[in-house]
Amino acid sequence: MKTVPFDPQAKPATAQEASAPDLLKLLERAAGYFSLLSEPSRLRIIQAICYAERSVQEIVEQTGLPQPNVSRHLALLHRSGVLSRRRVGTSVFYQVSDTTISELCRLVCLRMAGGLQESGA
């Protein structure tokens, strides 16, 4: 089995291993996944639906974001496989299909909240 990057139990990679095409491709995919979280509006949307399926209108109301922006971000998150959607009549409902994204957001927010408390902000 191949080693996974960032495994604290793995031995350090050699320069050749660190530049292997498979590893570089994996790191590019990971960077793309993280880029989904680089936009605060997407984080607000994910937070709004991380525990329950919601319609686009409910997401707009909960986040306070303009409907066109919400729709654009929802489409990107859906295409990336993070969200699933279903249509009921004229309404579209979204839910988180990749629970890793919710867990990752939670961990980062917990870390950031702890950092804010430590710095006195």
Image: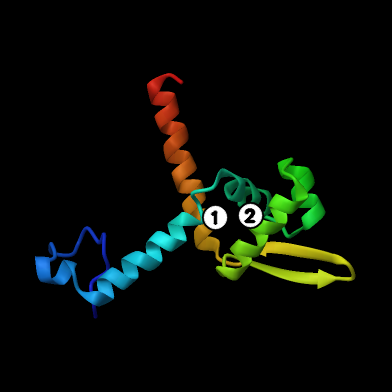
Which of 53 and 20 lies nearest the eye of the viewer?
A: 20
Q: Is residue 50 left or right of residue 8?
A: right
Question: What is the residue that sits farthest to the top in this orientation?
Answer: 120
Residue type, numbered disc 2: Cys
Which of 102 and 91 lies nearest the eye of the viewer?
A: 91
Instruction: Name the residue carrying label 2.
Output: 50
Q: Is residue 100 above or below residue 2?
A: above
Q: Is residue 29 left or right of residue 13?
A: right
- Residue 63's tag is none
Q: Is residue 11 above or below residue 69?
A: below
- Image quadrant in which the N terminus is located: bottom left
* Location of residue 77 (image quadrant): bottom right
Rate crowding at label 2 as few (under 14), some (14 to 19) or many (20 or more) other CA atoms within 10 Å. many
* Location of residue 96 (image quadrant): bottom right
Q: Are marks 1 and 2 in contact (CB under 8 Å)?
A: yes
Question: Residue at image x 38%, y 24%?
Answer: 118
Question: Residue at image x 47%, y 33%?
Answer: 113
Instruction: Name the residue carrying label 1.
Output: 102
Residue type, numbered disc 1: Ser
Element type at mark 1: helix
The image's colour scheme reads: rainbow
Q: Earlier in the sequence, mark 1 or mark 2?
A: 2
Q: Is residue 120 above or below residue 99?
A: above
